[in-house]
Image: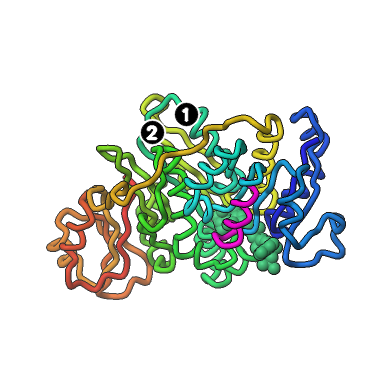
Amino acid sequence: MVHVAILGFGTVGSGVAEVLATNGGLIDHRVDDLVRLKYILDVRDFPDSPYRDLFVKDFGAIENDHEVDIVVETIGGAGIALDFTTRALKAGKSVVTSNKELVATHGYELLQLARANGCSYLFEASVGGGIPILRPLTSCLAANELEQVSGILNGTTNYILTRMIRAGLTFDQALAEAQANGYAEKDPTADVDGHDACRKICILAALAFGRHVYPDQVPAQGIRGVTLEDVAYADSAGYKIKLLGRALRQPQGRVCAFVAPHLVPGANPLAGVEDVFNAIAVTGNAIGDVMFYGRGAGKLPTASAVVADVIDIAKDLKKDRHNGWEEGAPDLVVSADGIVSPWYIRAQMSAEQARRRCGDIQLLARGGAPAGEAAFLTAPMAEPEVRERLEGADVGSLYRVLA
Ligand code: NDP
Ligand code: HSE
């Protein structure tokens, strides 16, 4: 029998318990053993839960129980979750998590620790919620030199942008809905300001390019500055505004990674990704372009990915999974200054001034635009150049256009 303990009985943790119970028969069949939930650790009490007899408050009960093979960490953050994960791995228990903050900040050392203790640290649910992406990246695409990984990595912000555009909700109303649906982080500024997408692109970059990329090496801009005016201008030219995380292979083994709102052409599949859905586009030198799409957050979709990792480990508890990457370095990540792209600009200036500053531009229009406002797309150029051309101007928005 394989015994499982869940740490943190919130949105994801309760989903894991539900999937283990609902699909118990087929999980046992696929593992060819009985997989049983033995403990749930949470700071709160759940007297009405069908699992009430499994609850404990002291992690020591799990750590010291030799029957526990797999610990599911769904507390979140890099505080107590780091302590519990470290202790579980040192006790020889494999750990499965949806906690991208922990993987992005401590993944390298935790993977090393797992290997040293003959167990596994798996985190499929940490990127893209229910979308299978990490295992395909390292297994199904293993024959490729990967060139680029990019996509819509945050369900909350994609949900907010979609609801603002489609239902005319305010930013705050749309965020409240995302929180009620269980999509948002405990502190939703992590979603809104791009930090969550940043953690996810760090994990993708580490797996794609083989070295740890830390969140503080990756510039992240969120969606606070995106206005309905920008949405209308983008729409007039057939673009959608999406928050993208991007990681690009660079010469000498370096990586360029960043998170920012982009104008995505309507013909690009990323433009049609709405609500809580995420999509991750990968470019490899053999396969060309491939895309992964699905629900990027939520109780059961995320639990689906967590339980898949539990099943993988339960099938062979002692397998060495080689799912790691090398140590990072301060000079590993290079700035995006060299990445040339067209730009979307909304600024207080006349069309003539826009042309004088930026040369060959495509002017955009929207109903109700005030006099003196210009919105336009530039020819491809690097960020330092576009900023120099706009120096001293009253610029409302400046976003890359995905070529
Ligand atoms: P929740 O806040 O819903 O759940 C976390 C649970 O852990 C809460 O019940 C919390 O209690 C409990 N907890 C807090 N501190 C402790 C502690 N010291 N000991 C035991 N339990 C504790 O978070 P989610 O389920 O939404 O997210 C969990 C992780 O999964 C996060 O890393 C998140 O980023 C990630 N994730 C979430 C997704 C989602 O759709 N929600 C999707 C993919 C990943 P209390 O509420 O009282 O603090
Ligand atoms: N808050 C995250 C999101 C949860 O909205 O994408 C999934 O990682």
Q: Residue at x 44, y 49 (%)?
A: 201
SS for callout 2: strand
Locate residue 392, reporting x and y percent.
17, 73
User: Which residue of the protein is positioned furthest toward the left in this rendering?
Assistant: 356
> Quick one: 367 or 158, which is closer to the camera?
158
> Quick one: 325 or 389, which is closer to the camera?
325
For disc 2, the neighbor class at 10 Å (few under 14, some 14 to 19, many from 20) is many
Locate residue 226, reporting x and y percent.
41, 65
In magenta, the rendered stretch is 76-89
Q: Mark yes or no: residue 26 visible.
A: yes
Q: Are marks 2 and 1 in contact (CB under 8 Å)?
A: yes
Locate residue 35, reporting x and y percent.
79, 38
In the image, taking residue 361 as reference, residue 107 lies left or right, namely right
> For ligand 2, which image quadrant applies?
bottom right
Q: Is mark 2 within 8 Å of ligand 2?
A: no
* Residue 184 picture quarter: bottom right
* Residue 87 is a magenta residue: yes
The amino acid sitting under disc 2 is Leu
The amino acid sitting under disc 1 is Leu
> Quick one: 80 or 123, which is closer to the camera?
80
